[in-house]
Amino acid sequence: MKKFISSLLLLTIAVIVFIPFTIWGIIEHIVQTFYKKRFFKALGVFGEILLLFATVIDVFLNVIFQVPLNRLMVKNRKGENSQFEYEITPYAFGNRKDTISRALGMNEKQATLTKTGDFICRFLNLIEKNHCKKSI
């Protein structure tokens, strides 16, 4: 019970400070980046910051939505060997060190994506060629 209460308290604090600290941090990055560098070089640096922020959100969503992602994006499939048949277990969503794209890429490699998971991979491939495979 003590661990639950302390975890709940830490989560509450994190949620409360998330929005103001995010806005403050982005403003500080913009000011620092554009003040010290030429405009187009600053855009490149700021683009890297935005990519890092997107990755953090991606990992967060992978953990928070692990149950629906595992239900909607992946399926078990049968594998065959010359001697026996076996079941291939999909790579699970929810690892706190993975992005959604990485989990999709692992399942694409194992051919354990559902139609929904395959659609998401194809959509991401429009943004970046072989996005899910590159994220492995």
Image (cartoon, grey):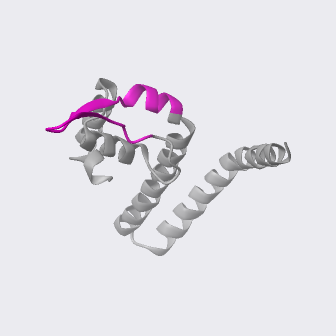
- Along the line of sight, the residue nearer the viewer: 99 or 94: 94
Residue 74 location (% of width, % of height): 37, 31
- In magenta stretch: residue 75: yes
Q: How many labels sit on residues?
A: 0
- Along the line of sight, the residue nearer the viewer: 5 or 39: 5
Instruction: Give left or right: position of 84 versus 87.
Output: left
Q: Quadrant of residue 126?
A: top left
Q: Which residue is drawn at 53% across and 34% down?
A: 65
Q: Which residue is drawn at 57% across and 38% down?
A: 64
Q: Which residue is drawn at 29% across and 37% down?
A: 121
Q: In this view, does 119 lie above or below 24?
A: above
- Along the line of sight, the residue nearer the viewer: 70 or 9: 70
Instruction: Give left or right: position of 117 versus 19.
Output: left
Magenta stretch in the rendered image = 67-92
Residue positioned most to the left:
82
For the N terminus, which image quadrant? top right
Q: Residue at x 82, y 49 (%)?
A: 6
Residue 70 location (% of width, % of height): 45, 32
Residue 4 location (% of width, % of height): 79, 43
Residue positioned most to the bottom:
36
Instruction: Give left or right: position of 20 versus 51.
Output: right
